[in-house]
Amino acid sequence: MALSRTDILSLYRSFLRVIERWPTDYLRPNRNFKHVLHLRVTEGFRQNLSVKDKDVLRALVMDAETELDALRRLANNEFKEKYPLSDRIYRPAANPKYYSGLVTAIDKAAKLKQEEDLKPSLWKRLLKYLNKTQ
């Protein structure tokens, strides 16, 4: 199997497409996994630009394809569907409403964070007010 530059570029683009589909974590904007994935992929491909040995290149591509397959499976929730959790996990006898309350609280916090991000910052509002008064 001869690897061409277009094959490697196609693999790179496939990574970027999967990463683009990755959900945004509104609760932790400073620890964005989507961003970390993008940095790792771009750096990994950039570091290996100078590899000329065909065997080493083939091994790197095989590893990358394995990682891409794992990311696709995670992005598609394949394991969640393949190995569903039982109702006993979601509603433990000691506190049956714990997880539903936790999910509700996380969703509420994410919604508030999104709304907060849409509001102009205090500084922007203050500057706008000062510009109007002058």
Image (cartoon, rainbow, N blue to C red):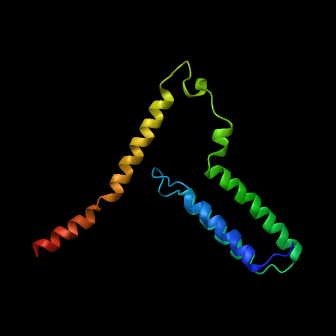
Picture coordinates of residue 107, whole percent (x, y): 43, 42
Question: Foreground residue, 112 or 88?
Answer: 88
Q: In which quarter of the image is residue 45?
A: bottom right
Question: Foreground residue, 79 or 126?
Answer: 79
Q: In which quarter of the image is residue 34?
A: bottom right
Question: Foreground residue, 7 or 118?
Answer: 7
Residue 105 versus residue 39 in the image, above or below? above
**So how many labels did they put on this image?**
0
Picture coordinates of residue 65, whole percent (x, y): 75, 62
> Which residue shows up at 42% across the image and 47% down it?
110
Residue 122 versus residue 130 in the image, above or below? above
> Which residue shows up at 63% across the image and 40% down it?
80
Picture coordinates of residue 35, whole percent (x, y): 56, 62
> Which residue shows up at 80% across the image and 68% down it?
60
Picture coordinates of residue 25, whole percent (x, y): 49, 52
Farthest residue to the right: give it.
Answer: 55
Residue 21 left/right relative to 67: left
Farthest residue to the top: give it.
Answer: 93
> Which residue shows up at 56% across the image and 28% down it?
90
| Location of the C terminus (image quadrant) | bottom left
Residue 8 left/right relative to 116: right
| Location of the N terminus (image quadrant) | bottom right
